[in-house]
C-alpha cells in the first residue's frame, strides 16, 4: 500500500528537497500528496512545484489565532488523510487539539540533540554552553514543544572555531540524511511506538542504536 505523506514548510525547503529526492526513488512505496506552507513566498513551494507536487499556501496571517489556523489545517489533513505529516522547517507551533487528533502521525525535525536545546537559536546556544556535540533530532510531535518520542538523531562534533552558521551548515547535512532515512522507514512500515512511548525501528540493516553516530559517513 503506497504510504501518503504531507509536508509542511516555511522556508528554503532543503529538508523538503531531501524528502522529495528519497521519495522519488520509491514511487510505489511512498508519495508526497501535498506540500503546504504558512509562507506563500517560501522557496520550498518552488521546489515542490518543480517536482510536480501539489502545493498549498495557508498564510497564518489570514487567521485570528493559532486555534483558528489549526482548525483550517485540520480540514486539509482530513481531506488528504495522510499516513504521516512531516514538518520540515515549519516554523509554527501546532495547538494540542490538532496534535492529539493526529497522534503519532505528525513528525518534526529539530536542529539539536533533544531534549537539549529546545526552542530557537540552538547552534548559538550549544556553542555558548560549551557542549562538544550539536546535531539534529527527528521526533513524533506532542503538544509540548520540541518533545515527543525520538525516531532518529545525528550528532555533529562542534569545532573550536565554529560559528553558529558554520555549525548550522554541517547539522543541516545531517538533517537531510536523517529525513531520507525516515522516508525509507515510512516506506518500509518500520516505525513502531511501544507501551513506554519509545520508538522501535524494525530494520535489520540499520538501527539507530547500531552506531554511536549513525549518520557519520554515507547511508
Ligand atoms: C532546518 O535547520 C530545520 O532544522 C529548522 O529550520 C531549518 C529548515 O531548513 N527547523 P529548510 O527550510 O529545510 O532548508
Image (spheres, grey):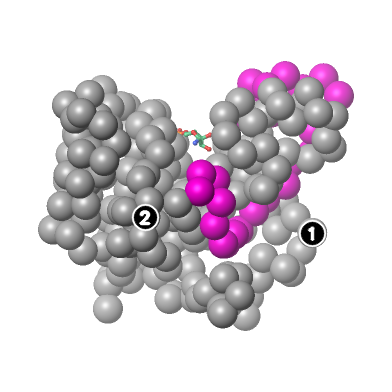
For discs 2 and 1, the disc positioned in front in the rendered view: 2
Residue at the location (37% across, 44% down)? 94
Percent position of residue 180, x then y: 49, 55
Q: Residue at x 70, y 43 (%)?
A: 116
- Above or below, 29 against 143 in this view is below
Residue 28 in the image: x percent, y percent?
A: 28, 70
- The foreground one among 93 and 210 is 93
Q: What is the span of residues highlighted in magenta in the rendered image?
A: 144-169
Are dots 2 and 1 in contact, CB under 8 Å? no
For label 2, the residue is: 99
| Residue 35 x/y as whole percent | 26, 44
Q: Is there any visible trace of residue 156 in the rendered image? A: yes
At horizontal 31% and vertical 53% (from top left) the residue drawn is 98
Query: Which quarter shows the C terminus?
Result: bottom right
With respect to residue 195, does 129 lie above or below? above
Mark 2 vs mark 1, CA separation in Å:
31 Å
Residue 161 drawn at (x, y percent): 82, 19
In the rendered view, would you say 134 is above or below 82? Answer: above
Answer with mark 2 or mark 1, whichever residue precedes in sequence. Answer: 2
Q: Which residue is mark 1?
A: 212
Q: Is residue 79 left or right of residue 216?
A: left
Instruction: Locate the N terminus and report the quarter of the image it occupies.
Output: bottom left
Instruction: Report helix, strand or loop for mark 1.
Output: loop
Say which of 107 and 173 sits in front: 107
The quarter of the displayed image where residue 68 is located: top left
Q: Residue at x 41, y 33 (%)?
A: 91
Amino acid at each position: 500500500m503506497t504510504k501518503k505523506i504531507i509536508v509542511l514548510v516555511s522556508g528554503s525547503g532543503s529538508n523538503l528537497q531531501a524528502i522529495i529526492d528519497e521519495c522519488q526513488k520509491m514511487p510505489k512505496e511512498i508519495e508526497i500528496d501535498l506540500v503546504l506552507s504558512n509562507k506563500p513566498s517560501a522557496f520550498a513551494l518552488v521546489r515542490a512545484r518543480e517536482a510536480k507536487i501539489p502545493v498549498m499556501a495557508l498564510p497564518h496571517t489570514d487567521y485570528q489565532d493559532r486555534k483558528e489556523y489549526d482548525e483550517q489545517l485540520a480540514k486539509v489533513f482530513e481531506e488528504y488523510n495522510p499516513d504521516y505529516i512531516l514538518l520540515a522547517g515549519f516554523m509554527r507551533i501546532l495547538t494540542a487539539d490538532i496534535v492529539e487528533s493526529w497522534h503519532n502521525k505528525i513528525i518534526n525535525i529539530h536542529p539539536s540533540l533533544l531534549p537539549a536545546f529546545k526552542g530557537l537559536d540552538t547552534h548559538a546556544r550549544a556553542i555558548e554552553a560549551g557542549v562538544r556535540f550539536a546535531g539534529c533530532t527527528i521526533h513524533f510531535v506532542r503538544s509540548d514543544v520540541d518533545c515527543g518520542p525520538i525516531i532518529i538523531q545525528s550528532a555533529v562534533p562542534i569545532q573550536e572555531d565554529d560559528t553558529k552558521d558554520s555549525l548550522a551548515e554541517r547539522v543541516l547535512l545531517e538533517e537531510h540524511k536523517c529525513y531520507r532515512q525516515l522516508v525509507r522507514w515510512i516506506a518500509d512500515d518500520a516505525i513502531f511506538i511501544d507501551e513506554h512511548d519509545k520508538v522501535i525501528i524494525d530494520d535489520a540493516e540499520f538501527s539507530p542504536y547500531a552506531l554511536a553516530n549513525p549518520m557519520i559517513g554515507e547511508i
